Amino acid sequence: MKFEGEHLLPGQLGHFFIILSFIASLLATIAYFTASRQTDLAVKNSWLRFARAAFFIQVAGALTVFSIIFYLCSHHLYEYMYAYKHASKELEYKYLLACIWEGQEGSFLLWIIWHSVLGTIFIIRRNSTSVNGWEAPVMTIISFAQFFLLMMILGIYFFGVKIGNSPFTLTRNELNAPIFDQPNYLSFLKDGMGLNILLRNYWMVIHPPILFLGFASTTIPFAYAYAGLQTKRFGDWVKPVLPWALFSAAILGVGIMMGGKWAYESLSFGGYWAWDPVENASLVPWLILVAGLHTMVVYKATGHSLRATYLFSFLTMTFVLYSTFLTRTGVLGDTSVHAFTDAGKAINVMIALFVAVFTVGSLVYYGINYKKIPAIHKEENTNSREFWMFIGSLVFFLTAMFIIAKTSVPVINSTFGTSIAPPEKVEFSYNKVIVMIAIIIGMLTAFSQYLKYKDTKKQYLLKGIVLPTIVAIILATCLFIFYPFTYRKEGAGFLIAIYIAAFATIYALVANTFYIWRVLKGKVMNAGASIAHAGFALMILGMIISSSNKVVISDSRVNGLNIPVSKDPMTKQEDNPQENLTLIRQLPTRMGEYEVTYQSDSAGHEKGRKFFKLLFEKKDPVTKDVSQSFYVSPDVYVMKDNNMSSNPDTKSYLSKDIFTYISYALNDANNVDTTKFKDTEIAEGDTAFYSNGIMILNKVVRNPNNAKYHYGPNDLALMADITVIARDGARFKAMPVVEVKGMDATKYDDTLYAQNLFVRFEGVGEGNKIRLGVKESDRLIDFVTVKSYIFPYINIVWLGLIVMALGLVLSMIRRATFSTVQSAVILILAAAGLFYMFLLANS
Amino acid sequence: MKKTHIALLIGIAALICGLLAYSVDLSTYDTVASAKNKPGKFVHLIAKLDRRRPVEYDPINNPNYLSFYAVDSLGGQTKVVYHNSKPSELEKSERIVMTGRMNADHFECKEILLKCPSKYKDDKQQLNKTVTNETTSK
C-alpha cells in the first residue's frame, strides 16, 4: 500500500547515519587500540591519524542523527513513532529538547553526543600537558563506550536478533490500530502524545544534559586508569587526570542537585531528595568519584593510595553504568517514581552486557596488574593529612556501598526470587545511617586541612585548629538556642544525632573558611579545595535545617481548628496525619500563620490543565491589617490518558519557601450544574429566603462605583446591594449587576461559593420591586484540597551547592593548563549560570 | 592497605552493620490472609479495589479520611482506611500496593501506590488504544 503524506527521507538518512557512526566507532576503537600498542612512531602515527578520522566521522554522524530527531519533533512528523510519542503541537518551543531526552533512545543519544564532545576536546588538546601521550589508550575506551551506546539505538536485526531500538521507527509499524490500514492515516493522526506534564519544567531542559555530561565525563578517569595499566606508566596518569576528575565531580554534583530542584518544583512528594532509587543511582558514582579525587591528591603529594585510586576510578564509571542498568531496564518497577519502564528484553540484555564488559573487564585487568602497581609499604602516620584523607575516602566509598546495596534490593529479589520489601520508613532507614556519615565527614573535613602531609607537629595543628573550634562551638550554640530543631518524629536519639551533625557541618564550614583566610592568606585562586569543602558543609547544613524544621502548615493539628482528630473513633489510634486541608471557594481558611482563600481557577496553556489561585494573607491578630500577602497557583492537569497530575507552586522568600500542591480536586466533567434560576420579586428593605438562610435587599444602586464595578454617570447600570445571612450566622455580601448598553442588557451574577448560591439581577418589577434570580446549585460546592509546607532556609542548600561547584571548578582551572583569560571566562560563566539557575530563576 | 586503615575500616563497617542490625526494618509483601495473621505488624499488601462496594471520601467534611474495600488475588477481603487525600486514579487502578498495619476490622493504610493501566505511554497496548480512540472519535 502507498501511504499519503509521509516523509520517509529523514528517517532513512537518520538510520544511515546511526549505522555509519556505529561502524566508525568500532573502527576508531580498533585503530586507537592498535596505535596504543605500537612502539614504532611512524606506524603509530598513521594508526592515530586513521583513528581520529574514524572518531570524527562518528561525531559528525551522531550530531546529524540528533539534528534529524530534532527536526522530526519540531516539524510534528507523527509518522515517526518518536515524534508521536514525545512531541505535540501545543508544546512550547523550549520543551522540544526536553521531549528528545524524554525517551530511552534520545537520552542514549545525549550521552553519545557528550562523549563525542569530550573526545573531540581531547583530540584537539592532544599536545597539552594533561593529554600528551595519553590520547591512544584513553580514546580507545571512549570509542569503545561509544560503540556500546550506539548499539543501543541501532535498531537492526542481526541473525534474527534485534539489536537496539532505533529512534526512527514508523508509527504504523509500531502500533496496531485500524487507521493504519488506510493510505491517508496521517490526516487522522492530528497530534502527538506530547511531553509528560511533570517534565514541562525548565529544569527538564537543562538537568538531563548536565547530568549526562557528568555521566559521560566519568569515562575519562576510567580511561586514564586503563591507560596507566596498559602503558605500564602506573603513576603518571594521576596528575593529568585530576582536572578531568574535578570537572566531572562539579558537573555530576550540579546535575544531581538539579534533579533534586526539579523534583522539588514539579513533583508533589514535598522535597528535593527522597532516596528514590533513581536519585541514589546517580549519587553513588559521585560519592566514589569524590573518594577517588582525594586518593589522587594523596598519591600526588605522598605516593600513597595509588591502588585505591585505580579502584575508585574504575568503579566510578562502572557504577554509572550499573545505575543505567537499574533505571532503564524496568528492574526497579514498584520502588521508583521516575525510572524508565521496561523497553524490552533485547535492550535489557544489551545494557547488561555493556555493564558486564566494563565492570568485569576493568576489575580483572586491575586484579592482574594489582601487584605491579607501586605501593609504599611504610604506614602513614596518624598525624599526617594523607591518613585522614584516606579515611574520608573510605567513608565515602562505604557510604556509596551502603546506598547501592539498599537500592539494589529489587535486583536481589529478581535474581534470587526473594520478596524483600522496603521498610516502613524508607527515608529514615537511610537518614539514620547518613546522619552518622555526616558527623564523621564533617569532623574530618574540619581538621584534616590543618594537618601537613607526612607528619604534623602538635603545635602547628593546635595553632590552626583552636580558634575555628571555638568559633564553631559559639556559632552552633547560638543556632541551637535561637533556632532549635523540632524533628521529634524519630525519637530523642535521632534528634541528638541531628544536632551533632549540624555542629559537625558548622565546624567544617568555619574551619575551612578560617583556612582560606589565615593559612592561605586569602589567596582565593589557591583555595579551590577549601571552598569546595565549605560549600559541601554549607549544603549539608542547609539540608539538616530545612528538613528538620519543615512544617506542614495545612496540618489540622497545626491549625488548632478541627474535626476531632486526636483519636480516630474507628481505630482508636492517635496521631494520624491530618495533612490535607479543604479550602472552600471564597472562604478564608486558617493555615499556619496565614489566612488562605481559594479565589478562582483558570485554564492553562495546555488543554486539561487548571490553575487554582490561592491568596495567602498574613494578618495582624489585633488590627487585622494585612502585613503580607501573595498568590500561589498550583495546578492540576488531566492528561490525555485521563490521568491527573498535580504540580506544586512555591512562594520563595530569602529565609523560607512556602510550598503548596493540590492533593484532591473535583473532576469538572462529573460535576455539572443542572438547576435553573428562580425569580423572586423584592423591594428595598425586604427579605427573601433560601434554603440555608435569608437575603436582605439593602438598596438598589444606580451606576455603582466601588471595588468591583466602575461605572460613570453616563452608563446605565443597576446593582442590587444584598446582605446574605446564613443559618449559622455567617454574613456575606452579594452584588449582582444588570447593565444596559444600547439594545443589550448584560447581567453580572454574583456567586457565593461558600453557600453554593447564585444571585442574578433579572430586571425591574412592579412598583419599587426588582426581580431577583436565585439559584441554589446541586453541583458540589467548589473547593480544593491542598497540602502546604514551609521549608525554612532551603536557599542554604542551593547556595552551598553553588559554592561547592565553584570550588571544584577553581581547582580544575588551577590544575589544567588554561590561560588567564580562559580561566576567568570559565569561572564567570559557571558562577553566573549557577547563581541564576538555582537562586534567581525561581519562578 | 595498612593495619590502621584496616582497623578503622572494620570499625566503620561495624558501626554501619550495627546501625543496620539494631533496626532490621525490612518488611514483607503479604496477602490479606497472611496480613490478618500478623495484626499490628507493618506489611506491604498487594490487592485490588473492590468495585462493588462504596468508596467513602468526603473532602469537605474531612479531607483526611478515605475508606474503601480491597480484595486480593486469593479472594481475601478487607476494609482499608487511609488518613490522607484520595488519589485521583483510585477508581481506575488495576492494582494497589498498600503499606500499613492490619487491625481488628480494617487495614490501616499509611501509603498507597497505584498501578494504573495507562500510567506510562511506553506501554504499547495503551498507545494502540489511545490512537484508536483519538482517530475514530474525530
Image (tube, grey):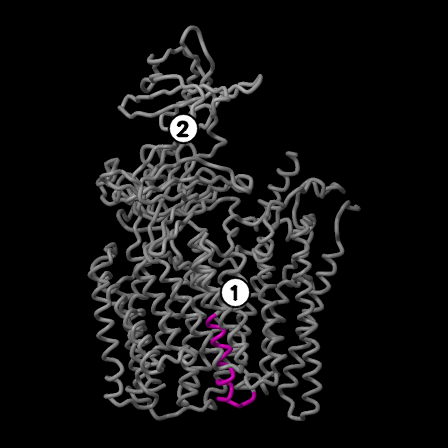
Q: Amino acid at mark 2?
A: Asn
Q: In this image, A542 relative to A496: left or right? A: right
A566 to A746, vertically: above or below? below
The mark closer to the camera, 1 or 2, is 2
Q: Amino acid at mark 1?
A: Ile
Q: Is residue A232 magenta?
A: yes
Q: Secondary structure at mark 2?
A: loop
Quadrant in which residue A773 is drawn: top left
Q: Is residue A288 magenta?
A: no
Labels in figure, total: 2
- What is the number of the mark on residue A210? 1
Quadrant in which residue A231 is drawn: bottom right
Cα gap from disc 1 to disc 2, whole angstroms: 53 Å
Q: Main secondary structure of the magenta part?
A: helix
Question: Which region shows up in magenta?
Answer: A231-250
Quadrant in which residue A286 is drawn: bottom left
In the rendered image, residue A282, in percent from the top left (x then y), is placed at 46, 65
In the rendered image, residue A468, in percent from the top left (x then y), is placed at 26, 76
